Image (tube, helix red, strand yellow):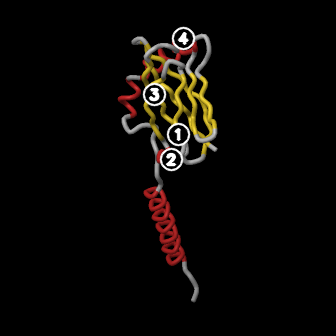
Amino acid sequence: MTLNWGHKLILVFIVFASLMSFLVFKCMRTNYDLVSKDYYKDELAYQQVIDGTGRASKLSTPVNIRQSEENIVVQLPAEMQQQEVTGTLWLYCVADAGKDRKFTLTAGNSGTKSFNTNGLKKGNYIAKLSWQANGVQYYSEQPVTIH
């Protein structure tokens, strides 16, 4: 059997429709993780992050976030010692939103707080630390690798 131009044209349309259907199917199954579900609301409050980062950069030493054994240790600057400090530590995983974790920060008189990493999956995170001392808001970000 020989294929005339009409058969070839129908075959091209069938192949094209099959490929487009496959691409639509793959696109519908792709998971897109956003940084935040309330992106626009967070964007309006982003000036607080900018101001907090500026205040944190003016402190005598930067915030030190490190991993030791099964803990993440947050060491606040010397100015934060002997003060009532509250805030949050958000371990943000860029690759997978399912790995994200938030911790509540209440530092003691030494300005140090430890967080247990037993429930965390290994990987690269961005530690987003937001804290408040004496009514002043501070903010800092650092990369952290969980082993």
Q: Position of residue 5 (x, y in %)?
A: 54, 75
Secondary structure under the numbered disc 2 in the rendered image: loop
Q: Are marks 3 and 1 in contact (CB under 8 Å)?
A: no
Secondary structure under the numbered disc 1 in the rendered image: strand
Q: Dot 3: within a 10 Å radius of its alpha carbon, few (fewer than 14), some, or many (20 or more) residues?
A: many
Whichever of labels 4 and 1 marks the residue nearer the N terminus, that label is 4
Q: Nearer the viewer, residue 102 or 93?
A: 102
The residue under label 2 is 119
Compute the Cα span from label 2 to label 3: 17 Å
Relative to residue 130, is residue 69 depicted above or below? below
Q: Position of residue 118 (x, y in %)?
A: 53, 46
Residue drawn 42% across the image and 22% down it: 86
Q: Are marks 2 and 3 in contact (CB under 8 Å)?
A: no
Whichever of labels 3 and 4 marks the residue nearer the N terminus, that label is 4
Q: Are marks 3 and 4 in contact (CB under 8 Å)?
A: no
The residue under label 4 is 79
Q: Quadrant of the N terminus?
A: bottom right
Q: Is residue 31 left or right of residue 95?
A: left
The residue under label 3 is 105
Compute the Cα span from label 4 to label 1: 25 Å
Relative to residue 1, is residue 49 depicted above or below? above
Compute the Cα span from label 2 to label 4: 32 Å
Residue drawn 46% across the image and 45% down it: 33
Check disc 2 and give the amino acid type.
Gly
Hey, which quadrant is residue 136 in on the image? top left
Residue 82 is marked as none
Q: Dot 1: within a 10 Å radius of its alpha carbon, few (fewer than 14), some, or many (20 or more) residues?
A: some
Check disc 1 and give the amino acid type.
Asn
Residue 116 is marked as 1
Whichever of labels 2 and 3 marks the residue nearer the N terminus, that label is 3
Q: Dot 4: within a 10 Å radius of its alpha carbon, few (fewer than 14), some, or many (20 or more) residues?
A: few
Check disc 4 and give the amino acid type.
Glu
